[in-house]
Amino acid sequence: MAKKSIKQVEQPREHNKASKIKVSLSINPIFDKHMNFLILNGPNLNLLGKREPEIYGRSSFDEFFATLQHQFPEHAISYVQSNHEGDLIDQLHQHGFDMDGIVINAGAYTHTSIALADAIRSITSPVIEVHLSNVFKRETYRHHSFISEACLGVIAGFGMHSYVLAIQALILKKQTSLP
Ligand code: DQA
């Protein structure tokens, strides 16, 4: 009887050891850093949910954005959509020196805009290019991106999850010293 009660005391101690390790990881300042991210959506992406749903899905970006913010409660994520190339460039200039990362879906400007590529090259915040669809499975004119070369990386083909993966990649990049 007495032995049993000793065992019962020991188990929580072991458990405490594990939870102490967890606590020390979570108070690591690198892991706890609050980050600011901007999502920039280009032309026709205001029509997500209505536009070619068989390709782009049935959810509006606003609906998705609420769940995205929920998934990263410790970080601030804002988003801007514009159908105008110059507006997207202005947003990059305005936020591209203080954001921890920018996620851009430039829509069709991906395949046409040297100006957007130059704007991405001109700023210091890391930029990830995303696409809902796998552009490489589609028309050949979608296979070339002018902006990829200026971006940290490209994520395509995962629907709205492409944005989640991009935010995760930016966080991982900040938190680790991996190349
Ligand atoms: C897109 C792919 C582009 O080719 C297209 O012009 C878009 C959406 C995507 O998210 O899959 O507008 O960027």
Image (cartoon, rainbow, N blue to C red):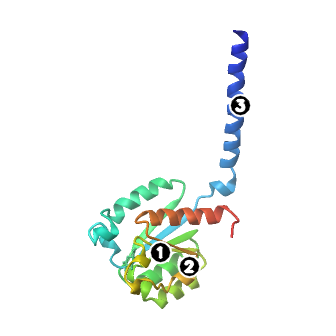
Tell me residue 128's x, y (percent): 53, 73
- Between 11 and 123, the one nearer to me in the picture: 11
> In the rendering, which numbered label is found on residue 104?
1
- Tag 2: residue type? Cys
Residue 159 horizontal side relative to residue 179, left or right: left
Q: Which residue is drawn at the image coordinates 67% and 27% (left, top)?
A: 12
Task: Residue at 46% x, 66% y: name it.
Answer: 162
Helix, strand or loop for disc 3: helix
Q: Which residue is mark 2?
A: 151
- The Cα–Cα distance between marks 3 and 1, rounded to whole angstroms, is 46 Å
Which residue does the numbered mark 3 point to in the structure image?
14
Q: Secondary structure at mark 2?
A: loop
Q: Are marks 3 and 1 in contact (CB under 8 Å)?
A: no
Q: Quadrant of residue 112?
A: bottom left
How far across and how far down the image is residue 1, in percent?
69, 9
- Count the marks: how many? 3
Q: Is residue 11 left or right of residue 51?
A: right
CB contact under 8 Å: marks 1 and 2: yes
